[in-house]
Amino acid sequence: MCGRYTLAGKPVNLEKQLRAQLRDDAKRLVDVPSYNVAPSALVPVVLSDSPEMISTARWGLLPVWSRNEEKPRLLINVREDSLRLKPGFKRYVHEQHCLIPATGFYEWRTQGKQKQAFYIRLKQGEWFCFAGVYESFRRADGQLDTTVSLITTEPNAVMEPIHNRMPVIIAPENYTTWLKGDTQGHPTDLLLPYPAEAMEAWPVSSRVNVPSNNEPSLLNRVEISDNNAQLDLFS
């Protein structure tokens, strides 16, 4: 799964990469770098029904089937095989796709009772986009709410020593295809592990565990014990 990520790139470069314009509320988000984006946060997104605009949504999908529950379960991640196989996710196979920009993400490796945080990013390029799905609905007060979830898949060689899942990253040449949901084969054909040779990872401080910690130093490499040394494979 993916439970934290970063937004720390130049807004103008994001607009160029997505060929989309930042709406005012989204621009305010990315104007100030964030190094610890957590679930329930407002995040920038590109929705399939408005691909020319980078808007905002709440991270934590509120599916239609749980909207009326007393304590609805918000989904920060959806497995790609759930989209293919589970009836409740069928509505997301061909539509309600989105792109969720980021500059990197965190994952935790569990070893015994210890958890070691890692930061993962692309070697080249400032911004990339997670594949996501979204729901929009109008509240009783007339306010439009949009919620999103990242899609996860099997790990590549960089992620495998850290975690058994990784978020799907959509290559720029596939942005339009994913948003339209009309690939030559099947939309879920794009939900594959990103090439490992294009990614890197390193261990970081457990300070990232606290969402209120939000500064560039969270990305600094930390030394890990000999027992965990084999985890630092991709620097």
Image (cartoon, grey):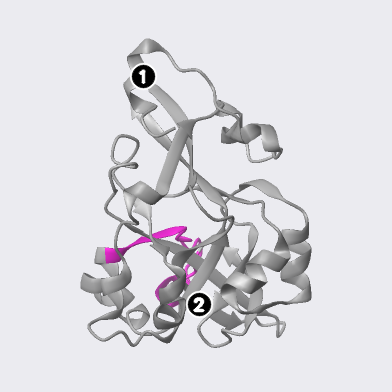
Tell me the crowding category of disc 1: few under 14, some 14 to 19, or many 20 or more residues within 10 angstroms, Cα based: some
- Label 2 crowd bin: few (<14), some (14–19), many (20+), radius 10 Å: many
Q: Which comes before the other along the chain, label 2 or label 1? A: 2
Indicate the secondary structure of the residue bearing disc 1: helix
Q: Position of residue 235 (x, y in %)?
A: 44, 32
Label 2: which residue?
A: 135
Q: Which residue is drawn at the image coordinates 54% and 56% (left, top)?
A: 125
The answer to the question of whether label 2 and label 1 lie on touching residues, with beta carbons closer than 8 A, is no
The image position of residue 52, as x and y in percent, is: 61, 85
Residue 210 sits above or below residue 28 on the image: above
Q: Amino acid at mark 1?
A: Asn
Disc 1: which residue: 228
Q: Position of residue 62 (x, y in %)?
A: 49, 69
Helix, strand or loop for the magenta stretch, by majority: loop
Which residues lie in the magenta part? Answer: 61-80
- Mark 2 or mark 1, which is nearer to you? 1
Q: Nearer the viewer, residue 117 or 197?
A: 197
Q: Is residue 199 left or right of residue 112?
A: right
Give the answer, above or below, for where 14 lies relative to 96.
above
Residue 65 part of the magenta-drawn span: yes
Q: Quadrant of residue 163?
A: top left
Where residue 154 appears, as percent x and y from the top left, is 26, 53
| On screen, residue 5 above or below 83 | above
